[in-house]
Image (cartoon, rainbow, N blue to C red):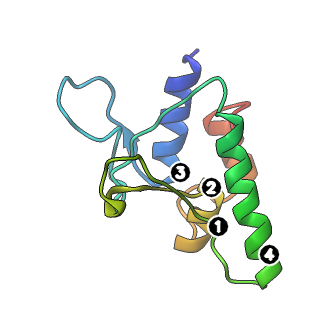
Amino acid sequence: MDKPWKAFERWLCRRFGGSRTGPTGKDDSDCLGTYPFALEAKHRKEIPAWLSAAINQSEVNGKKRGSGWLPLVVLHEGGTRYEDSLGLLRLSDVLEWYGPTPIDTEQDALIVSPGIR
């Protein structure tokens, strides 16, 4: 059985229609065949509470404005250019925005990686 981080990488790559590259020893994306996305998967036991709260706040604010708003959190590091800030979206919003991918059902997602969604 895969470790949680490896199972997540496999699931993510498949979700975007690609495959996991594994430890190639090269500077490369975690997934092949996911154009236009150069995916880098990071699995953590916990996401910082302030970060989860920020995306939740963005969702609430978007819903107040009506449909069609894509929740986005922008993280800026002091001393860096504003344009180099990071944008954080929920994966489900990205997938909804860009349309269906090869795995379209909850059933398929469970087969790929049981217990990870």
Q: Give the image location of residue 12, x and y in percent.
A: 51, 43
Q: Amino acid at mark 2?
A: Arg
Which residue shows up at 53% across the image and 59% down it? Answer: 102
CA gap between label 1 and label 3 equals: 21 Å
Q: Which residue is labeled 4 in the image?
A: 63
* Along the viewing direction, whichever of 102 and 55 lies nearer the viewer: 55
60 over 86 or under it: above or below: below
Q: CA distance from mark 4 to mark 3?
A: 26 Å
Evaluate if marks 1 and 4 touch, with contact meaning CB atoms under 8 Å apart: no
Type of residue at label 3?
Arg
Q: Nearer the viewer, residue 104 or 4?
A: 4
Earlier sequence position, callout 2 versus callout 4: 4
Q: Name the image quarter holding the N terminus.
A: top right
Residue at image mark 2: 90
Q: Which residue is mark 3?
A: 15
Establish if 111 lies above or below 5: below
- How many C-alpha atoms fall within 10 Å of the one at disc 3: few (<14), some, or many (≥20)? many
Q: Secondary structure at mark 3?
A: helix
Q: CA distance from mark 2 to mark 4?
A: 15 Å
